[in-house]
Amino acid sequence: MDALLAFAAALLALRLAGLLARRWRVTRRVELAAWAWSLAAYAVAAAAIAWGESAQWDARAFRVYYAAGGLLTVPLLGAGSLLLAGVRRAGATACVVAGVGLGVALAMPVHGAFARHGIPSAHDHLDWAPRVLAIAFNSAGTVAVVGVALRSLRRRPVGNALIVLGVAAAAVGSALAGRLGAGGTAIGIAAGVALLYAGFTLPTARRQSP
């Protein structure tokens, strides 16, 4: 059941990422490209959960899950928010962050024995460096998302609230992976990407003329 829930979450995230990519091709709004990549990273993370739960967790499945879910998703969300706010350097910074994250995920040593089910804890299988990097990336991305949302709250009250709720839902699912299990984390990812997509695509409220 957990594998099926994770697979469904991966399909949902991939579908919504594709819809955002289509909007980017039509409008050429750069923030949509960053957000599409972030939801694609969510899809990869959920697919890694389905892989681990169906075929038993090992270093390969965990490495993919950690790269997509721990090192890429939230920084890309933050980059999209900064691009929306007009910070054009955020695009280049996001490319650098993604490259560093992928490099670390490929090079980091993974140790310890894996349980058959349940998302592995980074504390049990990774050294301190990749864990600190993930905390730094996710903290910076979250600050960017929340900061931009609060700054433009009057123009997009509902949309920004949905974005913050989406980040919170996915974060809670990841933080409580040990208690919720893989299925609960997958549900958190599905709820998060649905809320994020709704927030990304909700139109800006028009100002009323005096």
Image (spheres, grey):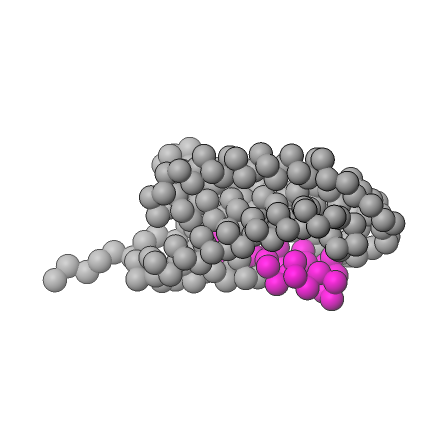
Magenta range is: 170-197
- Percent of width and height locating residue 32: 43, 41
Q: Is residue 78 left or right of residue 202?
A: right
Residue displayed at 66% across by 42% down: 67
Q: Magenta span: helix, strand or loop, mainly?
A: helix
- Percent of width and height locating residue 156: 34, 58
User: How many marks can you see?
Assistant: 0
Residue displayed at 62% across by 47% down: 133
Rendered-image quadrant of the C terminus? bottom left
Is residue 195 found inside the magenta-colored segment of the image?
Answer: yes
Residue 150: image quadrant is: bottom left
Residue displayed at 40% across by 47% down: 82
Q: Is residue 183 left or right of residue 93?
A: right
Is residue 189 found inside the magenta-colored segment of the image?
Answer: yes
Residue displayed at 54% across by 55% down: 139
Q: Residue furthest bottom?
A: 179
Rendered-image quadrant of the N terminus? bottom right
- The answer to whether residue 121 is above or below residue 102 is below
Confirm whether residue 7 shows in the render: no
Q: Residue furthest front?
A: 128
- Percent of width and height locating residue 206: 25, 56
- The answer to whether residue 24 is above or below residue 144 is above
Residue 23: image quadrant is: top left
Out of 171 and 188, give the one closest to the viewer: 171
Out of 154 and 148, give the one closest to the viewer: 148
Q: Is residue 50 left or right of residue 92?
A: right
- Percent of width and height locating residue 151: 34, 58
